[in-house]
Image (cartoon, rainbow, N blue to C red):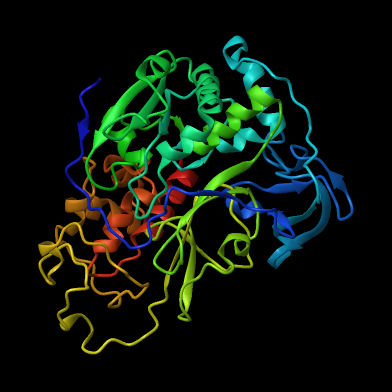
Amino acid sequence: MAKPIAIKKGFDIKLAGSPNKTLSDTPLSDVVALRPPDFPEVIPKVLVEPGTDVLAGQAIYFDKNRPDLRFTSPVSGEVVEVVRGEKRRILEIRILPDKGDSRYVEFARTNPAQLDRQELIEQLSESGCWAYIRQRPFSLIADPLDTPKAIFVSCFDTAPLAPDLSYIIGFEKENFLTGLAALRQLANGNLHLSFGRSLPESLTEAELEPLGRVHYFQGPHPAGNVGVQIHHIDPIQKGDIVWYVHPQDVIIIGRLFREGRYRADRIIALTGSSVTAPQYFRMATGQRISSITEGRVAGDAFVRYIQGNVLTGQTSAPTEFLSFYTNQLTLIPEGNEPEFLGWLLPGLGKLSLSRTFFSWLTPTRTYNLDTNLHGEERAFVLTGQYDKVLPMNIYPVHLLKAILARDIERMEQLGIYEVSEEDFALCEFVCTSKIDVQRIIAEGLQYARQEG
C-alpha cells in the first residue's frame, strides 16, 4: 500500500442529515428531461421533435461545433416538448417514459481492453457516454482529438454530506472495473485512481493495479476534490490537458461495454437536515426531483433544494429535473428569519473556523445550518483565511485580484489553469468579506479560455 498523501489545509463541515446506507429503487417520474445548459460551451442541434418515439441511448441532440458529440436519451418513450427560453435557447427536451421496461439501442458488447483508442472513442460518442469525460482546465467535456497527459478518477468525496462512493461502487464492481479498463485505453495507461485512507471492501489492489496507479489521501475537505488530487499527483502546467471522470460515470461507461446498452440510472444520495430519513435512491438521469423528495421533507419551514452539496450545488425547485452530473440532493432550511443581534450573539449552535463561537470545543459535533449568509459583501482585504483551507501551492487572494483586473499573464503565473470553482468553495465559506469567490474563478477561467 502506497504512503497516503496528507492534506493538512481544509475543513470538514459536519452537517446533520448524512444518508443512511439504505438503497431504494425509485419509479420513473411522469416526465424525464435532458438539459442542454448542463454542458457549458455546447450549442445544441435537436434531432427530434414532439411526437418522436425514442429508445434509451438514441441521439436527441448534438453539439453544432462538434457534431460527433452526441447526447442521448436516458429512457425510452415519446418526446413531448422542447422547452425554449430567451432567444429560443433550448432549456429542456422532455420525454414521456414508457410505462413498462425501457427499450434500448443495442451497442456492441466488447472488452474495452481489446479495442484500440479510436474504436473506444466511436462507441463512447455514439452512445452519448463521451459527455461523462471532462477535462481540466476549464471543466468542459473533453475533446476526443486531444491526448491527455493522464486521466483521474477520485473514488472518495469529502464534501458536506457527500455520498459514500465506496458503498456505491460495491453495487456494480464489475461495471466499475470495466469502465476503468476503457479509461486506461484512452489515457494510454496513464490512469490515476484516488481513494481515502483505504480501498472499498469490494476492491483489492490486485484488481486495480493493472488498470492504473492507486493513490491514498488523508485529510479534511477538499482532499476529495479531483483538482486537489491532480495538484498533488501531477500538476497542470500551461498547455497541459488532463481528463477526469466521476466513479458513477465510470460505472455507466462500464455498463455500455458489458451490457451493450446506455443505461443511465445512478444512485442519488438524499441528504440534509430537512429530510426525514436521508438515504440512497436509484434513479434515472433527468427524473423530477420531487420523485424522491415528495413526502420526505421534514417540518413546515421553507426549504432550499440543492443539486449537489451545500458548497458547490445548484439551487433548484422540486418540480425541476436532475442534472446530468448530479449525484447528491441536499435539503436545508432557508435562512429567511431575522436573528437578534446577528453574529454578535454568542451561541453553542453556531459554527466558526475561528474561536468567535464555541464550535472549537466540540470538533465532532454536527450542525443544523441554514442558508443565511450572516452578513453582506464588504471590502476585499487580505486576512489569511483562504490560505488555511486551500491545500494548493498558489496564492488565492492574488489570483482572485488578478482575475478581477483581467491580467491574463498574472493569472497564468498564479495557477489559473490548475483550479476550478469547487476548489475555492471553502474559501467562499470562510470569507468574512462575503466575496462570491466561485463566480470570480468561473469568470477567470472563461476569460483565460477566450484569451487562449
Hey, which residue is sitting farthest right in the picture?
A: 51
Q: Position of residue 249 (x, y in %)?
A: 54, 36
Q: Is residue 324 left or right of residue 139?
A: right
Q: Nearer the viewer, residue 286 or 376?
A: 286
How many numbered discs, if any?
0
- Residue 152 drawn above or below residue 452: above
> Residue at position x 35%, y 30% from top?
194
Q: Position of residue 90 (x, y in %)?
A: 71, 57
Hey, which residue is sitting farthest bottom in the picture?
A: 340
Quarter-of-image position of residue 363: bottom left
> Residue at position x 88%, y 49% from top?
52
- Residue 316 drawn above or below residue 96: below
Residue 94 at least partly seen: yes
Q: Nearer the viewer, residue 363 or 65?
A: 363
Q: Is residue 361 left or right of residue 273?
A: left
Q: Position of residue 206 (x, y in %)?
A: 38, 14
Q: Nearer the viewer, residue 273 or 187?
A: 273
Q: Is residue 185 left or right of residue 64?
A: left
Q: Nearer the viewer, residue 251 or 34?
A: 251
> Residue at position x 39%, y 61% from top?
310
- Residue 335 drawn above or below residue 429: below
Q: Position of residue 373 (x, y in %)?
A: 32, 74
Q: Is residue 446 left or right of residue 13?
A: right
